[in-house]
Image (cartoon, coloured by chain):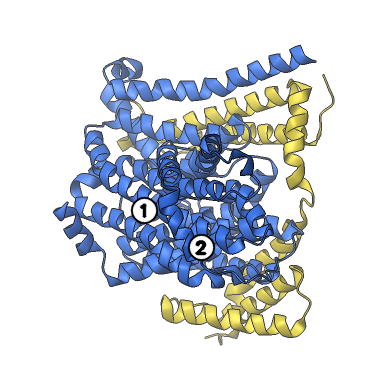
Chain colours: A yellow, B blue
Amino acid sequence: MPALNRQSMVDIAAGMISLGLGLGVYFLTFGFQIGASSGLASGMDASLYPRIIATILIVLGIILLVKTIFLNPTIREENAKAASNSNSKTGNGLIKLFPLGIGFTIAFPLVGYFVSTSVFVAAMLYVSGERRIVLIAATTILVVISFYLLFRYGFNIVLPEGRIWRPRA
Amino acid sequence: MMSVLADIQQFVGFTQIQYIVIGVILGTIIGALPGCGPMMGVTLTIPFTFYLDPVSSLALLIGIYQGGSFGGAISAALVGIPGTPIAAATLLDAYPMSQSGRASEAITLATVASWFGGCFGGIVLLVAAPSLASFALSFGPAERLGLALIGLTAIASLSAGSTVKGLMSGALGLMLATVGSDPFTGTNRFDFGIPELTGGLTFVSLLVGLFAISEMLIQLESTTPTARITEKIRFSTKCLWTLISDSGNYLRSSLIGVLVGVVPGVGGVSSAFLSYKISKDLSPDKDQYGKGAPGGVVATEAANSATTGGALLPMLSLGIPGDPIVAVMMGGLLIHGVTPGPAFMLTNAPMLNGILGIFLIGAFLLLPIGWLLLPVFVRILSIPKSFLTTFILALCIFGTYATNRELFDIWLLWVFGFLGYAMRKGGVPLSPLVIGFVLGPIVEESLRRLATISGGNFWGFLIGRPIALTCFVLILAMLIGPILAQMYRTRSNEKRS
């Protein structure tokens, strides 16, 4: 069997995830609390349809695994060439955005819209490459105020003020 | 005809026209931004359509779809980067035209061709949708299931990358649609005791996460510099004469666009390249194609704009989306309680005529909007990427929050953002997942009704339903076809080596 390149490893991971997901979903369906009303004439209760899809995921996972491992090496090279363009800086975006996004989601109800959004927008501009402080500050103020006006008065949505600023009863 | 006009008048007022105009402008702007496109535009707008009536929300979405399909041509012509994959074929001639100092002519031709293609698609839609829907009125659960699975299989097998991965993505979409209460028995499925999941996954979180957040993650990794446009771009009125001098190309390309658009999963990219190839083969100046031939720009832009009308046809008349953007629009309509398809046609024919009218008005308005705002659209390309990314991210987060005013939806947004990013990196197409999610309830309901009606004798029941049987034969052909093609390729490679 020829050596596996990077794209083949990715395909094997995708196949294994599909297989694992299918198996997981299949077993989870046994935990459904199926009531008396579920007894349809055909016997298609709430669990059968998810089981069909889980089986499809398992089969597709196996096909992808078999196909990738025993694939003709020339086709594998073509796949790798096609994927090489998108793999240049993998993970960079995740490292930049996800900590900020998760931090924002935690802070949003706690410190409220104004503080959390200001920090998020300013930090986002910084990690996207903007280094002019005045521009970052001006854009942050503009975005925070315009979004507040749009949501509060345009869509009538009350944005969180922050739990920590509220006096305890 | 008079009744259609009366219906359009009833449903399309000043407010709806305003939304069409806003949609076309926003769509063109988003379409012009490299990496964005009509899918991003429609995705970002969906949360805000909750606050509109169904017709107004569709007016906004259709406007964005039409504007977005055209907008990609602006960046393709000026900076050589297609704003959307749809505009990739436009780049072949528009960019060389631009480099030889004919940028205004290239963009004007793209505007005129998009306008013509869009209007052509709108007229076909207006004529064909009611006939197709009345034919589909006799469809039962077997036919509905067959059509839904055809739509899903076609998009999965025609998506970029491998068919297996496309099918995996579609199956994952069907699976995610089962989260929440079972529609028949009320049994909770895959809610893990989380109250927010009993109603199912929020469509907006899934959509915005998968497409917009993952795209922003990719943009953060890219090092493409912001474009600098120094040339003054103006609408060149002399290009309007090509409507007469090159009328055959306009008509032929628009027809190709509509026909390709009707086939689920094929879409604007294929129609543009197909039309380009035919136009080149039939042109007396075929040597000029690829070096700045105006006919090439006309062929690609007329075809991809006409595709929008073709893609809406199966959604409105059969309830089956022809491409991922239309699937998103269908999801938006479902949120409003409007289920497109033959039954909708029967009970809400005036509203459907209103929607068709909106499409035609949107297509028609593209020309005056393009004419007047072309310099503004060009300026948009100079906005620094850091500002754009931040603004779009804020829009994603607050748009998602605005849907249900639930923090849980923002958490889901990150989960689906990560999933979308992982899928893109793994070469798994995203579109089948969205179509699977939208079609999931239709597939499940049809399958369970079919199982009840057929008494378990599924194949025996199908023999008496020729349309459904044809659908299932086509599905099998779509699944087996790529395997045979790959086997043939492998054998040819082996012989060669």
- The residue sitting at 19% across, 45% down in the picture is B346
Residue A7: % across, % down = 76, 35
Disc 1 versus disc 2: distance between alpha carbons? 17 Å
Q: Residue furthest left?
A: B2
Q: Are the residues flagged by discs 1 and 2 in contact, CB closer than 8 Å?
A: no
Q: What's the residue type where badge 1 is placed?
A: Cys
Residue A51: % across, % down = 49, 31
Badge number at residue B28: 2
Residue B355 versus residue A95: which sits nearer the camera?
B355
Corner quadrant of residue B427:
top right
- The residue sitting at 32% across, 39% down in the picture is B318
Q: What's the residue type where badge 2 is placed?
A: Thr
B209 relative to B422, above or below: below
Label 1 CA crowd tier, 10 Å (few <14, some 14–19, many 20+): many
Question: Is B195 positioned to the left or the right of A9 in the image?
Answer: left
> Is residue A97 in sight in this rendering?
yes
- The residue sitting at 42% across, 62% down in the picture is B366
Corner quadrant of residue B290:
top right
Residue B67: % across, % down = 47, 60
Q: Secondary structure at mark 1?
A: helix
The residue tagged 1 is B119
Question: Is A41 positioned to the left or the right of B435 in the image?
Answer: left
Corner quadrant of residue B138:
top left
- The residue sitting at 69% across, 58% down in the picture is B99
Q: Chain of mark 2?
A: B
State which mark lies toward you, 1 or 2: 1
Label 2 CA crowd tier, 10 Å (few <14, some 14–19, many 20+): many
A21 relative to B363, above or below: above
Which of the marked residues, 1 or 2, is nearer the chain's N terminus? 2
Question: Is B356 positioned to the left or the right of B174 in the image?
Answer: left
Residue B448 versus residue B163: which sits nearer the camera?
B163
